[in-house]
Image (cartoon, helix red, strand yellow):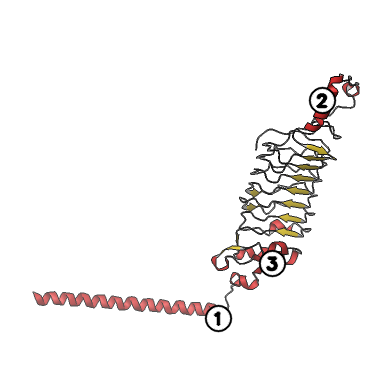
């Protein structure tokens, strides 16, 4: 992801004489540049920093979407609440990028080229409520990825086709999370532990994944039926890709009867029957070997007798 750390823009200190020094009056021709600076989006904002080039800033919202950016803007107004970096070509976010922007409420990185995010990216984003990471190339969600972002209400991880693993502690500490979208990824299995720590979860989108509906899927389905209140919009999209006997079946159509074989238990009669069958098979095996031995011996004697008669 790169080793370059992101740092806040230094602000003038109260004791700095330059902070109180009156600015020289600009020459009259410079006034003609003001409209051009506004159009270019580089005029200072209320947050004390300039609006990034190719972005627009208004009412603590910074919109850099659809600008074909290959990297995140180096500096943003420190009071930014809504940041959109959607529909670009961003492949990496520097470590500590969000450290300065503690007022951030909404972050969209939708439709970029992200493969992973640096550890601790959301460590200071305590007010972040909505996070959109959809349409990227994320391959896994590690433990503590959203650490300290306890205010998250919605996380969108949909349409990451390479997303094959979600760590059991990926969403640890997100007690307020209400909406989680994991649809249209590459998930074949999702640990129940990853969801049990989300008491506020209301909507879970999991359709469009290649789910393997074996015995390991039963705890998750049982939890979903008991906890999720609104899953109707997604239930038709969630299908089993395996094992072959349930391939194509809607995930939520599976019942306890579907997992009956997972709870197969043997009674005393079953054990006695198995022991009896084993005993019979053993006797049959001994008898068969005995008969084969006698037959071989007789054949050998008959062959020897025939040779003596010929002599």
Q: Quadrant of residue 176?
A: bottom right
Check if mark 3's residue and mark 1's residue have beta carbons within 8 Å.
no
Q: CA distance from mark 2 to mark 1?
A: 94 Å
User: Taking the image as drawn, is residue 173 in sight?
Assistant: no
Residue 5: x and y in percent read 71, 33
How busy is the neighbourhood of tag 1: few (under 14 within 10 Å), some, or many (20 plus)? few
Label disc, if present, on residue 269 of the rendered structure: 1
Instruction: Name above or below for residue 210 compared with residue 281.
Output: above
Closer to us: 223 or 249: 249
Q: Residue at x 46, y 78 (%)?
A: 277
Question: Does residue 207 show up?
Answer: yes
> Label 3 vs label 1: CA separation?
31 Å
Tag 2 secondary structure: helix
Q: Position of residue 57 (x, y in %)?
A: 81, 37
Circle 3 — which element?
helix
Q: Nearer the viewer, residue 261 or 238?
A: 238
> What is the x, y in percent for residue 51?
79, 34
Q: Nearer the viewer, residue 18 or 220?
A: 18
Tag 3 and tag 2, C-beta contact below 8 Å: no
Residue pictured at 60% horizontal, 69% vertical: 262
- 111 in relation to 226, above or below: above
Mark 1 element type:
helix
Q: Is residue 144 left or right of residue 17?
A: left
Residue indicated by mark 3: 222
Q: CA distance from mark 3 to mark 2?
A: 65 Å
Nearer the observer: mark 2 or 1; the answer is 2
Does 25 appear above or below 123? above
- Residue wearing tag 2: 33
């Amino acid at each position: 992801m790169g080793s370059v750390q992101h740092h806040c823009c230094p602000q003038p200190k109260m004791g700095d004489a330059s902070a109180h020094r009156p600015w020289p009056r600009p020459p009259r021709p410079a006034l003609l540049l003001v409209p051009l600076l506004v159009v270019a989006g580089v005029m200072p904002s209320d947050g004390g920093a300039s609006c990034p080039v190719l972005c627009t800033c208004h009412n603590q919202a910074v919109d850099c979407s659809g600008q074909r950016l290959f990297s995140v803007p180096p500096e943003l107004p420190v009071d930014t609440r809504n940041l959109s970096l959607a529909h670009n070509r961003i492949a990496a976010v520097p470590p500590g990028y969000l450290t300065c922007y503690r007022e951030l409420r909404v972050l969209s990185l939708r439709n970029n080229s992200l493969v992973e995010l640096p550890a601790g990216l959301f460590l200071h984003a305590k007010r972040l409520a909505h996070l959109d990471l959809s349409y990227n190339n994320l391959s896994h969600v590690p433990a503590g990825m959203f650490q300290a972002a306890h205010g998250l209400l919605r996380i969108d991880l949909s349409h990451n086709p390479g997303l094959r693993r979600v760590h059991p502690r990926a969403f640890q500490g997100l007690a307020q999370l209400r909406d989680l979208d994991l649809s249209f990824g590459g998930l074949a299995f999702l640990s129940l532990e990853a969801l049990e720590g989300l008491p506020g979860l209301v909507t879970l989108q999991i359709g469009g994944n290649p789910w393997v509906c074996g015995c390991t899927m039963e705890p998750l389905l049982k939890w979903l039926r008991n906890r999720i209140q609104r899953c109707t919009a997604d239930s038709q999209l969630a299908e089993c890709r395996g094992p072959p006997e349930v391939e194509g079946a809607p995930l939520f159509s599976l019942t306890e009867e579907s997992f009956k074989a997972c709870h197969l238990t043997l009674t005393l009669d079953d054990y006695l029957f198995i022991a009896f069958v084993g005993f019979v098979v053993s006797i049959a095996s001994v008898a068969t070997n005995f008969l084969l031995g006698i037959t071989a011996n007789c054949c050998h004697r008959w062959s020897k007798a025939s040779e003596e008669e010929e002599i």
